[in-house]
Image (cartoon, rainbow, N blue to C red):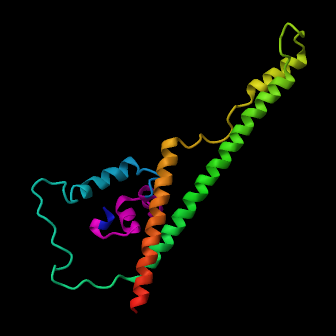
Amino acid sequence: MRAHFGLTQAELGQYLGVAREQVAFVEAGQRPFSLAAERRLRPLSLLLPGVLLAEVPAPPLAAPDEPAEAPDTAALRKRLRRCRHEAARLRYEQENHATRALAQAQRQRGLAQLRAALLPASAAATAATAETERLRRWLDALPPEVLPVPMSATARALGAARLRGLIAEAEALEQQLAAGEGHS
């Protein structure tokens, strides 16, 4: 929508009554807009191509017989930096998830070991003492998971696909920039 209307995140945010950062979070798929912002967005969405049935096609941005101009290397470099940054963030997120998953597995093993070591194997074998009951209550009160809910297999697969796409885009941008520098 922003690209269609040529708006910056700050400009769209001002229209919607939200901060620029909120627009960035929504575009990144990290947060949704508030209901009030969604209501303000609706009239703009009706103006997008393909929304109205009797829509007149938008005029082309450049006449077909005009020569194509060289790409803006500053814009390509900026996008390349953004792709590298996002790829590094996704790699970190995936590594962090693996670390959390190992820690969670360790906690589950540790709790099982504590339960086996601190509680008698059979209640008939030993009389339930106050200490045994205190330990049982303590172990029962320990949450089996202290970490955030692990990333689903679907989320991991989508993250991996996005990472591959960012890496491919960065490589294509590097090639484009190298080709542009070779012609200069």
Q: Position of residue 24 (x, y in %)?
A: 45, 61
Work out whether 8 lies above or below 94: below
Residue 129 falls in image quadrant = top right
Residue 16 falls in image quadrant = bottom left
Depth order, front residue of 23/53? 53
Q: Position of residue 21 (x, y in %)?
A: 47, 62
Task: Give the side of residue 64 with respect to residue 93, left or right.
Answer: left
Q: Is residue 6 magenta?
A: yes
Residue 7 falls in image quadrant = bottom left
* Rendered residue at 16%/68% (across/down): 58
* Rendered residue at 50%/53% (across/down): 160
Total marks placed: 0
Q: Position of residue 115 (x, y in %)?
A: 80, 25
Depth order, front residue of 39/101? 101
Quadrant placement of the N terminus: bottom left
Question: Main SS of the magenta segment?
Answer: helix
* Rendered residue at 42%/60% (across/down): 23
Quadrant placement of the C terminus: bottom left
Depth order, front residue of 88/35? 88
Depth order, front residue of 19/74? 74
* Rendered residue at 45%/65% (across/down): 168
Task: Give the side of residue 174 with respect to residue 133, left or right.
Answer: left
Work out whether 137 lies above or below 183: above
Q: Is residue 127 magenta?
A: no
Q: Position of residue 70 (x, y in %)?
A: 32, 85
Residue at the extreme top of the image, as rendered = 124
Span colored in magenta: 4-27
Task: Give the side of residue 6 with respect to residue 47, left or right.
Answer: right
Work out whether 136 lies above or below 4: above
